[in-house]
Amino acid sequence: MEQQRKIQAGDWVMFTGLSVVWGFSFFFIKKGLEVFQPLQVAAFRMSIAFIALIPLIMLNYKKLSIPSHKWKYIPLLSLFGNLIPAVLFCTAETKIDSGLTGIMNSTTPLFALLIGSLFFGVGLTQNKIIGVIVGFVGAIIIVLSKQKGFSGINIFILMPLLATVCYGFNANIFKSNFQTENPVIIALLQYSFAAPFTLVYLYYSGAFHQIQQEPLVAWSSIKYLLLLGAFGTGYALVFFNILIQRTSALFATMTTYLIPLVSVIVGLLDKESILPIHLFGLLVILIGVYIGSRN
């Protein structure tokens, strides 16, 4: 059973900061896709995150150790929390708007709750269940409003949904196995595991050669990928792990309820169309955040 703890002011600061940073991430992905392929954008995201965290790795290299029986969970955290979602989101944004991708991301708390209760023994409370359901209804309102004109299921919309399932597993794996570990160390280990694979892929996919051949064109996307990797991925994960450890997997993943608000505003500034029903859906989502965060 998850230990109950009152949400404090510092938790809300991290909650809001992560929501804003991740809300911008979908816009950064879109800019990266203007030059690079989806898998390359995902690989850049992971590689830049690792490089940005090297100073922390150097400062904590003597502490980069965990109990031997927990090492098996590091690849799972890296896969479910980083690699697989990055590929799914980048691929999805080749066919759907960044704002819609951010909206679909708001289903993460629902899967964090369901997966936690089914596989990790997380206790259910009435407020958590109602909050997640209300927030999910708000996301559905927005998703349905964006789907006018589709004659069937758009498979690319299912990719962000699958990514949020991965996030649900990631949050619960971390909460159940690393509650007493240093969250910064865990984040460093996650990216240290992923970086060798993503750097090798970037080399053999020709991404580095493309930068060398067309530096000005590449820079138009790389500058956004630097922000995405360093702040929207690397350091964001450090604070996300801290937030999970201080509160709960459900509360931490409820940052994804505010992400659509940010992504829609950014999309509006980038000349994406925003309808009144979208704002109504966001209001419902915020109500879900309030209900679900109460103990």
Image (tube, rainbow, N blue to C red):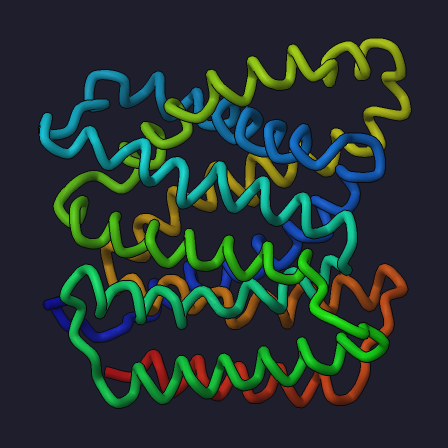
Q: Residue 59 in the image: x percent, y percent?
A: 32, 20
Residue 269 is left or right of residue 16, and the answer is right
Foreground residue among 116 and 64: 116
Foreground residue among 8 and 259: 259
Q: Is residue 163 above or below residue 279?
A: above
Foreground residue among 163 and 5: 163
Q: Where is residue 132, by image quadrant?
A: bottom left
Quadrant where the C terminus is found in the figure: bottom left
Q: Is residue 171 above or below residue 187?
A: below
Q: Residue 12 in the image: x percent, y percent?
A: 39, 68
Tally the marks: 0
Q: Residue 194 in the image: x percent, y percent?
A: 44, 26
Q: Where is residue 148, by image quadrant?
A: bottom right
Residue depicted at x 41% and y 38%: 79
> What is the residue that sits farthest to the front in this orientation?
152
Residue depicted at x 89% and y 16%: 214
Q: Is residue 248 above or below residue 226?
A: below
Quadrant where the N terminus is found in the figure: bottom left
Residue depicted at x 29% and y 64%: 115
Residue depicted at x 60% and y 80%: 140
Residue 232 is left or right of residue 72, and the answer is right
Q: Residue 201 in the image: x percent, y percent?
A: 59, 18
Foreground residue among 289 and 173: 173
